[in-house]
C-alpha cells in the first residue's frame, strides 16, 4: 500500500510539519542503517507499509531474531561497514560508464554479503538475508582477477588491468613503460636494414612517430616506407610496425588505454589517422610571406580577383 502525500506529511513520516526537516520525524527516529541502500529501503517501507499478515509476521520474525543478539548485529554491521552503494554502481554499470573502482566496489560488496550471510545461516527467520545468489561469487572472482586492487579513478589514466589478463595488453603496456628502449632498438634495426646511417625516428604531435631520412639518402628508402611529410632537407615516413593505424590497413589492435577500460570499448582515431593540422609556422605566416611563396600564375589570378 502506497500512502498519499497528505498522510505522509501529517504523520510526519519523513519530515516534521513545523520545520519541514527530517530531524524529529519517524524516519529520523528509526533510521540506524549503516548504508545508503539500507536507508532507502527503510524509507520505502515507511511510504508503502505491508497489508498482508503473513508478510508482516515474516518481517517481525526477522526483527525478533536480531533484537536479543547485539553481538551478532554488531558483527553484521561491521561486515557491511564501508560497502559502496551497490544500487548506484549498478546504475552506472547498466549505463555503460563504470570505472574499475566501481567494479572493485561491487566485488567487495559481494564478499561482505557472503561474510554476513555466513553469520546468519543458522537462523531460519533470516534465511532470505542469508542467501547469496550462486553467480555473485563467480562475478566477484572475475573482477578481482581482472583489475588491480587500487585502480586509478578515471579510465583514461589506464593501468587498471592486472598483468596476465590479456597478452596484447601486456605487450602494449610493456611498450609504453619502456618506449624509449623500443624506439632506440627500432631505429638501430632500421639503420642496419636500410643501410642509412643518418636515419632517425622522430616524434611530433601531428603524425606521432615517423622515420626521418635526409634527401641525399632517398635512393635507399625501402618500398615499405610510406611518406608522411616533406621537409626542406628530409622526408618523413611511417611503417606498419611503427604506425599500425595507417590508412588502408586492416583494423589495428586497440590501444592499451582502450583495452584496459572496464567496458573495453574501442576508440577510433590516432596520430597516424588524424588529418594533419597546420603547423604553428603556417598559422602565423604573414600575408607578405604567403604572397612571396605563391607561383606567378596564382599571384596574377589573385591580383585580378582583387581588382574585380
Image (cartoon, helix red, strand yellow):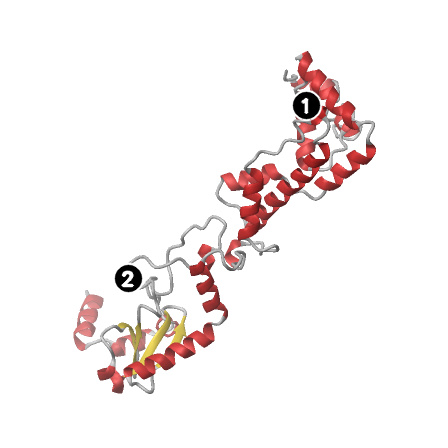
Q: Residue furthest front?
A: 122
Residue at 72 percent across and 30 percent down: it is 122
Residue 273: quadrant of the picture: bottom left
Pick whichever, 214 or 80, lies toward us.
Answer: 80
User: Which residue was labeled with disc 1?
Assistant: 45
User: Which residue was labeled with disc 2?
Assistant: 247
Is 18 left, or right, of 85 in this rendering? right
Pick whichever, 145 or 27, lies toward us.
Answer: 145
Total marks placed: 2
Residue at 70 percent across and 31 percent down: it is 121
Pick whichever, 288 or 94, lies toward us.
Answer: 94
- Give coordinates of residue 28: x percent, y percent: 77, 29
Q: Is residue 49 above or below residue 28?
A: above
Residue at 63 percent across and 31 percent down: it is 131
For the N terminus, the quadrant is: top right
- Give coordinates of residue 272: x percent, y percent: 34, 65
Q: Is residue 30 above or below residue 308?
A: above
Is 79 left, or right, of 108 in this rendering? right
Residue at 78 percent across and 34 percent down: it is 72
- Give coordinates of residue 113: x percent, y percent: 66, 38
Q: Is residue 276 above or below residue 96?
A: below
Amino acid at each position: 500500500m502506497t500512502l498519499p502525500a497528505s498522510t505522509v506529511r501529517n504523520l510526519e513520516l519523513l519530515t516534521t510539519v513545523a520545520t519541514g526537516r527530517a530531524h524529529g520525524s519517524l524516519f529520523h527516529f528509526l533510521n540506524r542503517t549503516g548504508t545508503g541502500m539500507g536507508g532507502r529501503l527503510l524509507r520505502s517501507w515507511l511510504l508503502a507499509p505491508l497489508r498482508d499478515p503473513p508478510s508482516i509476521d515474516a518481517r517481525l520474525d526477522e526483527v525478533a531474531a536480531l533484537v536479543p543478539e547485539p553481538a551478532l548485529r554488531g558483527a553484521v554491521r561491521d561486515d557491511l561497514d564501508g560497502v559502496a552503494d551497490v544500487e548506484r554502481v549498478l546504475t552506472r554499470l547498466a549505463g555503460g560508464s563504470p570505472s574499475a573502482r566501481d567494479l572493485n566496489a561491487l566485488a567487495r560488496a559481494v564478499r561482505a554479503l557472503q561474510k554476513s550471510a555466513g553469520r546468519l545461516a543458522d537462523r531460519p527467520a533470516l534465511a532470505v538475508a542469508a542467501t547469496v545468489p550462486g553467480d555473485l561469487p563467480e562475478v566477484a572472482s572475475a573482477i578481482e582477477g581482472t583489475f588491480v586492487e587500487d585502480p586509478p579513478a578515471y579510465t583514461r589514466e589506464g593501468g587498471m588491468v592486472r598483468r596476465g589478463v590479456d597478452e596484447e595488453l601486456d605487450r602494449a603496456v610493456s611498450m609504453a613503460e619502456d618506449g624509449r628502449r623500443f624506439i632506440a632498438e627500432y631505429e638501430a634495426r632500421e639503420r642496419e636494414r636500410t643501410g642509412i646511417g643518418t636515419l632517425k625516428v622522430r616524434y611530433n604531435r601531428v603524425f606521432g612517430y615517423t622515420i626521418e631520412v635526409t634527401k641525399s639518402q632517398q635512393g635507399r628508402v625501402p618500398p615499405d616506407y610510406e611518406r608522411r611529410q616533406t621537409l626542406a632537407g628530409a622526408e618523413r615516413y611511417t611503417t606498419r610496425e611503427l604506425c599500425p593505424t595507417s590508412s588502408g590497413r586492416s583494423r589495428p589492435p586497440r590501444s592499451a588505454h582502450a583495452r584496459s577500460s572496464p567496458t573495453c570499448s574501442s576508440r577510433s582515431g590516432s596520430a597516424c589517422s588524424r588529418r594533419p593540422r597546420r603547423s604553428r609556422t603556417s598559422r602565423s605566416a604573414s600575408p607578405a610571406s604567403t604572397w612571396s611563396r605563391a607561383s606567378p600564375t596564382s599571384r596574377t589570378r589573385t591580383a585580378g580577383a582583387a581588382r574585380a
